[in-house]
Image (spheres, rainbow, N blue to C red):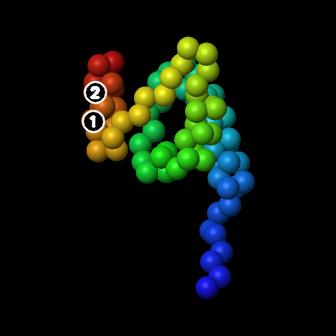
């Protein structure tokens, strides 16, 4: 059986770079909460860490079932 991928690792990386540029332009200095299974893919996780973890910054990981509640609490606190 010959399986052809729908998207390559290079294409994923390019899309993440594009998304990262958009997010950093639109949300500079703000917290960003990403929800979804794709953020747990090792390639995606590594690229997000590169984009958003500068000196003194960290990434918070939450169980997917709790991520939406956490985001809602952050939003409500504003």
Residue at 48% in and 28% down: 59
Callout 2: SS: helix
Residue at 61% in and 20% down: 54
**In the visual, does 29 lie left or right of 73?**
right
Q: Quadrant of residue 55?
A: top right
Q: Are marks 2 and 1 in contact (CB under 8 Å)?
A: yes
Callout 1: SS: helix
Mark 2 sits on what residue? 73
On screen, 7 above or below 73?
below
Q: Which mark is residue 36?
A: none
Mark 1 sits on what residue? 69
On screen, 14 above or below 51?
below
Q: Quadrant of residue 26?
A: top right
Residue at 72% in and 54% down: 10
User: How far across and how far down the image is residue 76, in percent?
Assistant: 28, 24
**In the visual, does 15 lie left or right of 68?**
right
């Amino acid at each position: 059986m010959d399986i052809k991928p729908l998207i390559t690792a290079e294409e994923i990386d390019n899309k993440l770079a594009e998304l990262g540029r958009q997010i950093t332009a639109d949300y500079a200095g703000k917290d960003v909460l990403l929800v979804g299974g794709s953020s747990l893919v090792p390639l995606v996780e590594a690229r997000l860490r590169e984009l958003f973890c500068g000196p003194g910054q960290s990434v918070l990981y939450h169980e997917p079932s709790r991520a939406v509640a956490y985001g809602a609490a952050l939003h409500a606190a504003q």
